[in-house]
Image: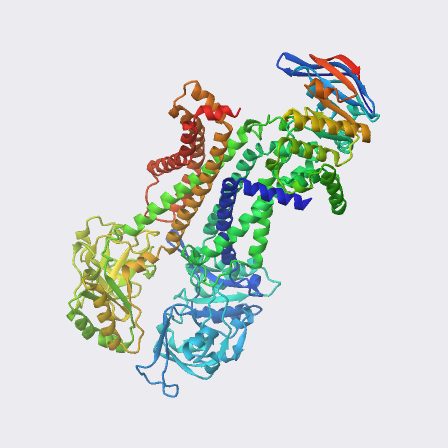
C-alpha cells in the first residue's frame, strides 16, 4: 500500500515538474535557512554548558550608581579576592585577571633568556589569564601534563595544547621551557591542558599563576585598594548547594558595607551573576571570550527562522490545494474503488512527506554549501558542524511539523471530495478550501516579506549612516601602533618621533593612550574652578601629546592645543563637557581649572568641537584630553594617502628596529572603527539575506498560484476575449486581487516593522529617523516584484488565442 | 438482490426545487442484466448512482442484499458497496499515473489483500482479458476499447455481485462497443453476474434481459426480453 502511495506520489512529482520544482525549491531554501539559523543559535546557547558545575557557578559582579545612571562592572577590587574567601568560608572561589593583547616571547635559545632578534613573538588577543589553582576546583578541564597545583608557585605558566604546539612545535616538548610575557615576566611552563571547546567565554590559552601578579599590580592596571576597580579582575564563585543566591546577595550587601563603609555602600554593591547569563548579559561589556550575544539577537534570529518556515509551508498549502483540483478525478475513482477517507488522507500526507523529504535532502546540500559563509553573519568558529545530535532532532521535528502543517489541510480537502462531483470534473478552484483561506495565506506571506524588506532598508540605512557619519575628527589614513610605556620605550619616544617625521609619507605623529572614538572608558571624579567639592558626575579622559589634535584633525571651538613642553599642564575639553559645566560660551571657560581625583589643578587651554567619544551607540561623554607620557603607550601616525602601502611598510620597519622586543600590531583607525559595529553589520546582512529568501519564496508561491489560476480560467479568458475584452483588462483581471492583498499585508507589516526596527534603532544614540520613505519604498518594492512575477503569466494568458482555449470545451 | 421503494431525488436551489427522480419502485434479482434507457436528463445516471450508493436519495427506502441502505451509516454503506459492487464508466476513469497492472491492482489494495494473492488475481484478470502484453503501459498509451477493457477488469477483480455500468460504450466506436457488450453478455450468462447498465443505444440494451425506460424521473416502462 505504502509502496503504491510513493509510486503515485513520485509519478505525480515527475509529471508536474515545474510545479514540483517550485514546491521543492521554496521549501528547500526555507529549510536550509532555518537549519543554518539553528546551528548558530544552538552554538550560542551551548556556551560553557559542558562544564559539569554549569548551574552552580556564579561571577561576583558590581553595580555602581553614578549620578542618575547605574553602571555595571564585571570585575572586583584587588583586595576583595581574599576578603571574599574570609567572609564566605563555605564557598569555592577562583580569581582571574585577564590580560588582553599580551605579548608572549618564546626565546630562540631556551637556556639563555636574553633578547635576541630570533625570538618568536606572539600577540595573544585573548586567553591570557592570571589564574588561581582553585579555578580548577570549580571549572573542569583535561590536563595533558601537570596539574592545578603547579599554579601555586609564582612565575609558572600552564599552556593549552594548540598554543603550546604554536610556541614549541609540539606540546610534548613544552614542559620546563621558559617564555617571556609583555617583556617583563619570565615564566616556566609547568603544565599543559587540552584545548577548550570554542563555545566558551573562558578561552584558556596561557595561564599564568595568579601569585605572579602580586609584584606587578600596577603594570596590569591593578591597585591594592578597595577604591580601584578593574574590569579585568574577575572572581568566580561556587556556593555550597544549600545556599540560595538571594541569601548570598544579602550577605554580599553586608560585606559591601563592611569593606567600603556605609556611605560608599549606598551607591556601590556586589551581586551574583549566574554563569548561564554571562554569555547574554550585555550590561557588563565583553567577557573573557571573543563576543557576547544579546538574547534579543537570538530571539530575532529564531523569529526570522519561524517566519521563513511558515512562508515555505504556506506555499505548500497554497499550491497543494490548488493542484488538488487537477487530482480530483483520481480521488473520485479511488473512492469508487473502495478507498476510505483515512486512506486518502494517508496517501496525501505520504505525497507531502515525499516532497518534504526530497526538499530536506536538497536543503542539507544547500546548507552545507552555505556553511563556510556562516561566519560572515554570525560569530561561529570555522569548524562548526552542520550535523549534530541537536540538528538531527531539529530537522526531524521540523520535517514532522512541515508535513503536518502543510500536509493535513490539503489532505482533508482532497479526501473530502464527493466522488460523483469529482468524477464529473465539477470541482473548481473556488470550491477547494475556500478562497478566503488562500487570501489569508498570501497576505501572511507578503506581510512577512514586507516586514523583512522594511527591516533590511532600516538596518542598511542605519549602518550606512554609521559608516559615513561625521565623527568630528578625521579617521582616514591614521595608523595606530600599540606599544609599551615601560621606561626604555619612553626614553626612545622623542627620537623615534623625529625619525618617523623624516619619512615624507608621514604627516604627523602622536603618542596617545586612546583614539578619539573607542570602546574604552577611563573616568574619574573631578573638581571644577577651585571648588572644594567634586561634581556628582565623572569626566572621561583621553591622553595624548600636543600633536593629538593635528593627527586626528580635531577642530577647535576656542583656545588652542597645549604645547609639547607645557609646564602648566593645560588640558583641552570637549563642547559637551563645557555645556555640562554650564558654560555656553566656549571662550569663557578658557583659563578655568579642573582637578582630577586627588591630583593637581589643570588650566583649560582649549575647547574642541564635539567628536564621537565612543561608538555611535553611546552619547558623547564629557571628555578631556590631557598629556601624560606614562599613559601614552600607543602611537598614532597620520599618513599621506599616496604610496600608502609603501609608507606603512617603512613605518613598520622603523618601529621594529626601534622596539625589537615588541611584536608589531599596527592597524588602521577607520578599520578599527568599522569593527565596532560587527554585530550590527552582521544583523544588517542577515536582514538582507533573509529578505531576499522571503521575497524569493513568496514569488515562487505567487507564481505557482497565478499559473494555476491562468489554467483554471483559460475558458473564462477565452469567453471574455470573444466578448471583446482588451489585453490590459485581462491582465488587470489577474493582478487586481494580488495588488489588493499586497496592500492589506502592507497595513499589517508596517506597524510590526515600525515597532521592531524602532526598538532596534534605540541601540544607537545617533540614528536615522524612521521616515515614511522607508515604508513607501517597501510597498513599492513588493508591488514591483509581485508584478514581475504575475505579469508574465497574466500577459501570456491574455495573449492566448480564444479559439484554442474554447475549442477544448 | 436490490429493491427501491418510492425513491425520489431532488435538488433545492433557493426556492427552486428541481426533481430528478420521482417515486421510483424497482426490484432487481440476482442474475438479471438490466438496461436503463431514456433521453438526456431523464435521471438515468442519478438512478445508477443511487443504486451504487455513490449518491443518496432524498426520500424513499432502499434495500441491497436485504440490508436497509437508507438506515446505514456512511461507513457501513461504503463497506457494503465496496464488497459487492463494481463500477464501469463511460470515460473509463482509469488513474492516469498508474500502469494497466497497477490500475487493476488498486481495488485489491483497498480490500487489504496480501501481495502474493494480489499478483495471482491480477495475473488471472490480465490473462482473461488478453491484455498481458499491455500490463506495463499507461492508460494514455491504449485505445479507448482497451482502456474500457481495463476498466472492466478493474471492476471485476474484487468479484462483485453487482456490476454497474454508466454508458460503458459511449466513448467507443461501434466495433469496440460490440466487443464490450459481448463481454457483458458472456459475464451475465456464463458467470451469472448481475449487471445494470445505462445506455442510449437500443442495440446495446438488447444484450440485456430487461429494459427499463425512464422519462422525467419516473419509470415509463419495464419489459423483459
Residue A525 occupies which quadrant of the picture? bottom left
| Left or right relative to A654: residue A270 | right
Name the foreground residue: A677 vs B78. Answer: B78
Query: From what the image shows, is residue A55 above or below residue A462?
Result: below
| Left or right relative to A429: residue B211 | right
Q: Residue at x 78, y 30 (%)?
A: B187
The percent position of residue B49, horizontal first and vertical second, equals 71, 24
The residue lying furthest to the front in this view is: B175
Query: From what the image shows, is residue A589 above or below residue A701?
Result: below
Q: Quadrant of the N terminus of chain A?
A: top right
Query: From what the image shows, is residue A231 above or below residue A142?
Result: above
Name the foreground residue: B195 vs A689. Answer: B195
Query: From what the image shows, is residue A398 above or below residue A234?
Result: above
Name the foreground residue: A744 vs A50. Answer: A744
The percent position of residue B70, horizontal first and vertical second, equals 78, 23
The percent position of residue A371, horizontal first and vertical second, equals 46, 57
The residue lying furthest to the right in this view is: B66
| Left or right relative to A488: residue B17 | right
| Left or right relative to A418: residue A807 | left
Tally the numbered discs: 0
Coloring basis for residues: rainbow
The residue lying furthest to the bottom in this view is: A111
Amino acid at each position: 500500500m505504502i509502496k503504491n502511495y510513493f509510486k503515485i506520489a513520485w509519478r505525480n512529482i515527475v509529471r508536474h515538474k515545474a510545479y514540483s520544482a517550485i514546491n521543492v525549491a521554496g521549501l528547500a531554501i526555507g529549510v536550509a535557512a532555518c537549519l543554518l539559523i539553528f546551528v548558530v543559535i544552538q552554538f550560542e546557547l551551548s556556551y560553557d554548558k559542558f562544564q559539569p558545575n554549569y548551574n552552580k557557578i556564579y561571577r561576583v559582579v558590581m553595580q555602581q550608581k553614578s549620578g542618575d545612571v547605574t553602571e555595571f562592572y564585571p570585575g572586583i577590587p584587588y583586595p576583595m579576592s581574599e576578603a571574599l574567601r574570609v567572609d564566605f568560608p563555605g564557598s569555592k572561589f577562583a580569581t582571574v585577571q585577564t590580560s588582553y593583547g599580551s605579548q608572549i616571547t618564546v626565546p630562540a635559545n631556551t637556556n639563555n633568556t636574553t633578547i635576541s632578534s630570533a625570538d618568536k613573538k606572539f600577540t595573544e588577543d585573548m586567553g591570557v589569564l592570571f589564574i588561581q589553582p582553585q579555578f580548577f576546583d570549580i571549572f573542569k578541564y583535561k590536563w595533558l601534563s601537570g596539574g592545578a597545583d603547579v599554579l601555586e608557585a609564582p612565575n609558572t605558566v600552564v599552556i593549552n595544547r594548540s598554543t603550546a604546539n604554536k610556541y614549541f612545535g609540539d606540546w610534548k616538548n613544552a614542559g620546563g621551557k621558559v617564555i617571556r610575557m609583555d617583556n617583563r615576566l619570565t615564566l616556566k611552563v609547568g603544565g599543559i591542558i587540552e584545548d577548550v571547546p570554542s563555545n566558551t567565554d573562558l578561552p584558556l590559552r596561557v595561564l599564568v599563576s595568579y601569585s605572579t601578579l602580586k609584584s606587578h599590580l600596577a603594570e596590569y592596571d591593578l591597585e591594592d585598594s578597595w577604591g580601584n576597580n578593574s574590569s579585568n579582575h574577575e572572581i568566580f564563585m561556587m556556593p555550597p548547594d544549600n545556599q540560595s543566591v538571594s541569601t548570598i546577595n544579602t550577605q554580599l550587601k553586608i560585606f559591601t558595607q563592611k569593606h567600603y563603609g556605609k556611605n560608599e555602600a549606598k551607591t556601590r554593591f556586589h551581586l551574583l551573576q549566574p554563569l548561564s547569563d554571562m554569555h547574554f548579559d550585555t550590561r557588563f561589556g565583553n567577557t573573557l571570550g571573543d563576543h557576547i550575544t544579546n538574547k534579543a539577537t537570538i530571539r530575532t534570529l529564531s523569529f526570522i527562522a519561524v517566519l521563513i518556515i511558515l512562508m515555505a509551508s504556506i506555499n505548500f498549502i497554497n499550491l497543494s490545494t490548488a493542484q488538488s483540483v487537477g487530482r480530483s478525478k483520481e480521488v473520485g475513482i479511488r473512492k469508487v474503488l473502495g478507498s476510505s477517507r483515512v486512506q486518502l488522507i494517508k496517501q496525501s500526507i505520504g505525497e507531502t512527506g515525499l516532497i518534504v523529504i526530497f526538499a530536506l535532502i536538497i536543503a542539507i546540500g544547500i546548507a552545507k554549501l552555505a556553511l563556510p559563509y556562516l561566519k560572515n553573519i554570525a560569530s561561529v568558529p570555522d569548524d562548526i558542524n552542520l550535523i549534530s545530535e541537536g540538528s538531527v532532532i531539529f530537522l526531524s521535528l521540523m520535517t514532522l511539523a512541515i508535513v503536518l502543517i502543510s500536509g493535513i489541510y490539503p489532505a482533508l480537502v482532497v479526501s473530502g471530495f464527493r466522488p460523483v462531483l469529482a468524477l464529473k470534473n465539477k470541482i473548481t478552484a473556488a470550491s477547494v478550501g475556500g478562497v478566503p483561506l488562500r487570501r489569508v495565506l498570501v497576505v501572511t506571506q507578503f506581510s512577512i516579506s514586507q516586514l523583512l524588506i522594511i527591516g533590511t532598508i532600516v538596518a542598511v540605512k542605519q549602518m550606512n549612516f554609521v559608516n559615513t557619519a561625521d565623527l568630528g575628527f578625521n579617521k582616514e589614513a591614521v595608523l595606530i601602533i600599540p606599544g609599551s610605556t615601560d621606561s626604555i620605550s619612553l626614553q626612545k619616544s622623542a627620537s623615534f618621533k623625529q625619525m618617523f617625521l623624516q619619512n615624507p609619507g608621514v604627516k604627523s605623529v602622536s603618542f596617545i593612550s586612546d583614539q578619539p572614538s573607542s570602546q574604552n572608558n577611563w573616568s574619574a571624579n573631578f573638581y571644577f574652578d577651585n571648588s572644594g567639592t567634586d561634581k556628582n558626575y565623572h569626566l572621561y579622559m583621553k591622553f595624548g601629546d600636543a600633536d593629538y589634535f593635528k593627527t586626528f584633525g580635531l577642530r577647535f571651538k576656542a583656545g588652542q592645543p597645549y604645547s609639547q613642553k607645557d609646564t602648566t599642564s593645560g588640558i583641552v575639553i570637549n563642547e559637551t563637557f563645557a555645556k555640562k559645566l554650564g558654560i555656553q560660551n566656549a571662550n569663557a571657560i578658557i583659563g578655568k581649572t579642573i582637578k582630577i581625583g586627588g591630583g593637581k589643578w589643570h588650566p583649560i587651554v582649549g575647547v574642541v568641537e564635539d567628536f564621537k567619544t565612543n561608538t555611535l551607540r553611546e552619547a558623547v561623554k564629557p571628555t578631556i584630553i590631557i598629556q601624560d607620557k606614562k599613559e601614552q603607550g600607543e602611537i598614532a601616525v597620520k599618513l599621506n594617502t599616496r604610496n600608502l602601502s609603501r609608507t606603512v611598510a617603512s613605518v613598520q620597519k622603523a618601529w621594529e628596529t626601534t622596539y625589537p622586543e615588541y611584536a608589531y600590531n599596527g592597524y588602521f583607525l577607520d578599520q578599527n572603527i568599522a569593527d565596532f559595529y560587527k554585530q550590527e553589520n552582521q544583523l544588517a546582512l542577515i536582514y538582507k539575506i533573509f529578505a531576499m529568501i522571503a521575497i524569493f519564496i513568496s514569488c515562487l508561491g505567487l507564481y505557482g498560484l497565478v499559473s494555476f489560476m491562468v489554467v483554471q480560467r483559460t475558458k473564462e479568458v477565452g469567453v471574455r476575449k470573444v466578448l471583446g475584452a482588451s489585453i490590459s483588462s485581462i491582465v488587470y483581471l489577474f493582478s487586481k486581487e494580488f495588488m489588493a492583498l499586497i496592500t492589506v499585508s502592507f497595513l499589517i507589516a508596517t506597524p510590526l516593522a515600525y515597532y521592531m526596527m524602532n526598538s532596534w534603532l534605540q541601540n544607537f544614540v545617533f540614528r536615522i529617523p524612521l521616515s515614511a520613505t522607508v515604508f513607501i519604498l517597501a510597498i513599492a518594492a513588493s508591488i514591483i516584484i509581485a508584478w514581475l512575477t504575475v505579469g508574465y503569466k497574466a500577459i501570456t494568458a491574455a495573449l492566448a488565442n480564444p479559439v484554442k482555449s474554447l475549442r477544448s470545451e | 438482490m436490490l429493491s427501491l421503494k418510492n425513491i425520489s431525488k431532488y435538488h433545492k436551489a433557493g426556492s427552486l426545487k428541481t426533481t430528478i427522480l420521482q417515486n421510483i419502485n424497482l426490484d432487481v434479482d440476482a442474475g438479471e442484466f438490466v438496461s436503463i434507457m431514456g433521453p438526456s436528463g431523464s435521471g438515468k445516471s442519478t438512478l445508477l448512482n443511487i443504486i451504487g450508493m455513490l449518491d443518496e436519495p432524498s426520500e424513499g427506502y432502499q434495500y441491497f442484499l436485504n440490508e436497509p441502505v437508507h438506515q446505514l451509516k456512511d461507513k457501513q454503506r461504503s463497506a457494503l458497496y465496496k464488497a459487492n459492487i463494481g463500477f464501469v464508466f463511460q470515460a473509463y476513469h482509469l488513474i492516469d499515473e498508474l500502469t494497466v497492472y497497477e490500475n487493476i491492482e488498486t481495488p485489491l489494495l483497498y480490500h487489504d489483500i496480501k501481495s502474493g494473492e494480489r499478483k495471482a488475481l491480477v495475473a488471472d484478470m490480465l490473462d482473461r482479458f488478453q491484455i498481458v502484453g499491455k500490463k506495463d503501459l499507461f492508460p494514455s498509451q491504449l485505445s479507448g476499447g482497451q482502456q474500457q477493457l481495463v476498466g472492466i477488469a478493474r471492476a471485476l477483480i474484487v468479484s462483485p455481485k453487482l456490476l454497474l455500468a454508466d454508458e460503458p460504450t459511449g466513448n467507443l466506436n461501434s466495433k469496440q462497443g460490440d466487443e464490450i457488450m459481448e463481454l457483458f453478455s458472456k459475464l451475465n450468462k456464463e458467470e451469472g453476474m448481475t449487471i445494470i447498465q445505462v445506455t442510449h443505444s437500443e442495440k446495446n440494451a438488447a444484450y440485456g434481459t430487461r429494459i427499463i425506460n425512464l422519462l422525467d424521473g419516473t419509470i415509463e416502462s419495464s419489459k423483459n426480453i
